[in-house]
Amino acid sequence: MQNSDVKRTKPPWKRFRQWRFISVLLVSIGILLFTLYNSRTESFTLLRSSFVSSKPLTSEATPALPQVPTGEHPSSPYTVPYPHPYHFTLDQPSRCRQESPFLVLMVPVAPSNREARDVIRSTWGTETTVMGQAVNHYFVLGQPRDGENVEQLQKQVLEESQTHGDILQSSFLDSYKNLTIKTMVMFEWLTSHCPNTSYAMKVDSDIFLNVRNLVDMLLKSPRQLYMTGVVVRDAAVMRNVDSKWFLPVSEFPEPSYPTYAMGLGYVFSMDLPQKIVEASSHVKAVYIEDVYVGLCLRYLGIQVSDPPTGGFGTFKPEVTDNCYWTKVITTMLWDSNELKNTWTAYETQTRQCL
Ligand SMILES: *[C@@H]1O[C@H](CO)[C@@H](O)[C@H](O)[C@H]1NC(C)=O
Ligand SMILES: *[C@@H]1O[C@H](CO)[C@@H](O)[C@H](O)[C@H]1NC(C)=O
């Protein structure tokens, strides 16, 4: 190497050092961003599974599956009386058979929650023909509880049912702890009322639902033995007595739940309702409805599938003006009012995006 060269330009070793520095810097930034991104998705995952998981306080779980036959009456506050011959006090006995929808949306809602039903009727409930496929929705109710103005409420629900033809009300007492019963009578109803329907979805009333993306996905999905949604795997059973989802070891000895689809919105092929109803007479009916469906599926040896293209979201991201609503299938909202505003945003985006 000549001296003149060294004077004119930077020496090659110096340039090498500079490059090395820049590369190391870039790699570091990359690693930092990657870590940040991951911790974000991880905290999101944690948040999501904080619904269902926490470190078990005890590890003395037995690996054996608790396939305890059910009785008609719950032996503890953590199980519900099911199977049991509940019957529908408000029904739509022939609508599903006559209309033969491709997809049926089943929305569990409390009798008193008229507002949520009306908001759905004016938002995603309006999507009754999507990509040439008929879509129906039904609201699934139990009986109003004492303390509510039972007679007046029941009168309102009856009128509402006559006006809209979308109410199914079963004879059990409607309560949070009875959601498993609600889900099971929903499966019973689907089994006997919708012989020419391909898919059904159980979807909560505080959910944004993009029916078009859902139908688009379903048109390419398996027609049998299929369930998808937000799939939860290996979630630890809540052993903290204060948890909303507490289950004692005596009721559920395994340390984690089976794989299941989160209750906020799961969709399934129409061969499953009957199978799940059959399985339910062999699986103890725990009160956590989505976990119970997971237990029935495990009993049947049926796997829950991840959605092919994602889209089953849980929490609303901070930024939604980037065509978010036209890309997702589900997103959890706070209440019905938020669904109203969200639907307006979604309609704007359907005009602007794509
Ligand atoms: C669940 O429904 C059953 C049947 O109607 C009723 O006996 C029971 O009290 C209800 N449980 C709760 C917690 O509401
Ligand atoms: C089933 O539905 C399809 C379209 O949804 C329709 O063409 C067909 O006639 C229906 N079959 C019966 C038996 O209702």
Image (spheres, helix red, strand yellow):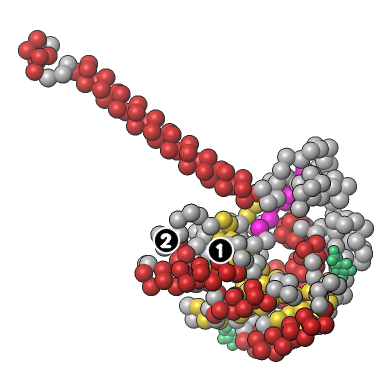
Q: Are there few (<14), some (14-19), or many (20+) residues within 10 Å of tag 1?
A: many
Q: Quadrant of the N terminus?
A: top left
Is 309 situated above or below 155?
A: above
The residue positioned 73% from the left and 75% from the top of the image is 112
The residue positioned 57% from the left and 56% from the top of the image is 315
Q: Amino acid at mark 2?
A: Asp
Is 18 situated above or below 305?
A: above
**Element carrying mark 2:** loop
Residue span colored magenta: 254-262
The percent position of residue 311, horizontal first and vertical second, equals 52, 60
**Element carrying mark 1:** strand
Q: Which mark is residue 330?
A: 1
The percent position of residue 111, horizontal first and vertical second, equals 74, 75
Q: Quadrant of residue 287?
A: bottom right
- Spatial CA span between label 2 and label 1: 16 Å
- Residue 330 appearing in the image: yes
Is 50 situated above or below 220?
A: above
Q: Which mark is residue 321?
A: 2
